[in-house]
Image (tube, rainbow, N blue to C red):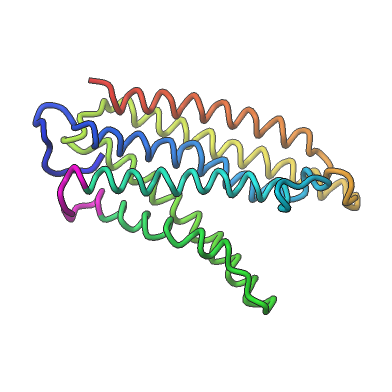
Amino acid sequence: MAEGHSHDHDHPSVLKRLHGTFMVIAWVFFNSLGNTVARYFQKTWTNRQYFGVPVWSFYHRIYMMACWTLTCAAIICIFIDLEGFEAHAHSIVGLATFVLVFVQPILGLMRPAQQQAQSAIRILHTLLGHVAYILAVTNMFLGVGLESAHISTTMYGLLGGAVGVHVLAHVAFNVLEYLTRRKGSELDVNKDASFSRWRKTTFMVQLIALYAFSIVNVVYVWRE
């Protein structure tokens, strides 16, 4: 999805298409789900752990490490394909996204002794995560517009649909958060918070919808 020299002036190279594929899967699918789990599921699966960590944290790490790995692979692919760096909107935003993504695992694993420092790092981790998502999605729209990408403008609508699913899921989860607070019941450490079943159902709908949008977007990346 990045502009520059192509091994084939009529069609994007395989590396360029792999770059677009990895970015779509990383951000449309894995990052969206990782954000959802971290934001809305800390009081779900409260009586279970995987490998010594809460279930929500386990899934968050899996999704975000998949996003991190695919983003790194995408950057490697495009640097090999272009044999360097060309300064334009897509490449600059992409590089900024990569820098944010690269430091996110470091921030997520930092555990300073002071409570105030922990809170500051947690806020920074969350803020940079949201900024990275916005930059990544914006850059995918910029990538579709590149002449060298040869991607149908239909993909604008497909990416918009994926973003729409992400936004609607957040709206639904916030409604469930409001209903939980309104119910005002105390959290039992051995029992999921109120409306957790609805959260799980909403999450499954989000997962299936984002999976479908990811597949279709990838098809358009490779479509002649």
User: What percent of the width, then of the height, locates residue 23?
Assistant: 37, 40
Q: Is residue 85 magenta?
A: yes
Q: Which residues are magenta?
A: 80-91
Residue 34 image-quadrant placement:
top right
User: What percent of the width, then of the height, locates residue 106?
Assistant: 51, 64
Q: Is residue 87 above or below residue 29?
A: below
Residue at x 74%, y 41% (from the top left corner): 176
Q: Is residue 132 magenta?
A: no
Residue at x 87%, y 46% (from the top left corner): 183
Residue at x 88%, y 44% (from the top left corner): 191
Question: Which corner quadrant holds the N terminus?
Answer: top left
User: What percent of the width, then of the height, locates residue 119?
Assistant: 64, 70
In front: 174, or 42? Answer: 42
Q: Is residue 210 above or below residue 54?
A: above
Q: Is residue 30 above or below residue 129?
A: above
Q: Is residue 213 left or right of residue 73?
A: right
Number of numbered discs on residues: 0
Question: Which corner quadrant holds the C terminus?
Answer: top left
Residue at x 24%, y 37% (from the top left corner): 16
Residue 126 image-quadrant placement:
bottom right
Q: Is residue 190 left or right of residue 164?
A: right
User: What percent of the width, then of the height, locates residue 32?
Assistant: 53, 42
From this viewpoint, which residue is outermost toward the front?
51
